[in-house]
Amino acid sequence: MAPRTLLPWTFALPLALATGCGSAVPVPTPPPAVVTVSLPVTLPVTDYEEFTGYTDAVEKVEVRPRVGGYLIKVNFQDGAEVNAGDLLFQIDPSTYQADLDRAKAQVKLYEAQVRYSEAEYRRNITLNRQGSVSPEELEKSLASRDSNMASLQSARADVELKALNLGFTRVTAPIGGRTSRTQITVGNLVTADPNPTLLTTIVSIAPIYAYFTVDSGTVLRIQRMIREGKFQSARMTPERIVGAALALSNLRGGNFMPLASQFGLPRVPVFLGLETEPGQFPHEGFIDFVNNVVTPSTGTLSVRGLFPNGDRALTPGLFVRVRIPLGAPHPVLLVSDLALGMDQGQRFVYVVNAKNEVVFRPVTAGRLQGRLRVIEAGIGPNDRIIVNGLVRVRPGITVEPRMTPMPFAPEAAENGKAEDGRRKTEK
């Protein structure tokens, strides 16, 4: 059987029936999107600036011999921590001991000559009064006595020199710190002149410096705060430097601030973090040096912080991150960083108004405080911020808000309490 051919009017009939009705089929209205909203968190926050720098030893010494000779003993392990005065190397002392013994014998010889010449001079004085000795003989005996006394003084000085040289065969640590490897082993000849042999190097590790550079904009801001009395200058006077030396001489870890207060040092704290401590600045010290000029080629000012390093966590030459607090704590609004969007470089949040409508709100975002972002302008403390479901909303639509605490707010509050407690402890 041949296939039937469907006429065009067979398709048009259902369409005509459908469109011929007087009213269209109603389209159901979708329910409002459910979003999670939170109020901004208000916490006291201290402004700060962060910089990059490096650690360096407070003291560094190249240990070299002051006398030459054969090395007979190495008294430390490579990389060991030593104290000032510890014996490091022993040079063969036999030659220097013999020189000292010979110098002491020379002293005894001149002492005998001085005694004889003194007795002869006194005898000639008596004989000269009796006319038995001429004035020339008297003058000659006086010159002989003075010459022998001068020779005795020279011999005694030579004994002191020989004793020093003998003592220099014991090469001791001039400072406390950590040694490098031994540059020369037992049995080798070391020289003192004209090019002293390098034996090892020592760097101090407690306390330790951290150098960093501050951009000129931050320098000007801090200078303005100093003039306004909102920030204390970190430049040290000679009296403060002496106080710092006294404070550090007995410090082996702990908090610098009580000692800084005791000796009148500038209370400008600085915090340091390592590469293995992301987002953390657990090491606390204070600024002890600010350079007197801004480098024109880079527009930066060199600054140095001093850290106790009682746990020996810092080593000279490390890359570090440095944070300096600026001014006193002040209350700010914070929201979860997840609630922020970006539109052509402008940060914004979605706010739900009293009619449950979504409002686009541009904001000025500040620094991260934990996992919350400081909002400097754009929102108020009672604004309901959408923190979840941003992809389902757009400005102007009506939503169903569900209130919840700001994400990460407890964590930020605990951080704020810890910072506040630390500041009270410093005071």
Image (tube, grey):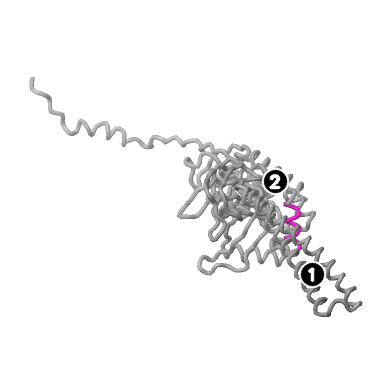
Number of the label disc, if any, that sits on residue 57: none
Residue 263, compared with residue 83, is above or below; it is below
- Marks 1 and 2: in contact by CB < 8 Å? no
Q: Does dot 2 land on a helix, a strand or a loop?
A: helix
Query: Residue 369's x, y, as percent?
Result: 61, 47
Query: Residue 182's x, y, as percent?
Result: 54, 45
Task: State which region is magenta.
Answer: 239-248
Q: Mark 2 — residue? A: 419
What's the residue type where badge 1 is placed? Arg
Nearer-the-camera pick, 368 or 49: 49
Q: Magenta segment: does it hold 416?
A: no
Please name the predominant secondary structure of the magenta segment in the image: helix
Q: Mark 1 — residue? A: 145
Q: Callout 2 environment at 10 Å: few (<14), some (14 to 19), or many (20+)?
A: some
Nearer-the-camera pick, 156 or 210: 156
Query: Residue 174's x, y, as percent?
Result: 66, 52
Nearer-the-camera pick, 20 or 305: 305
Nearer-the-camera pick, 86 or 43: 86
What's the residue type where badge 2 is placed? Glu
The quarter in which the N terminus is drawn is: top left
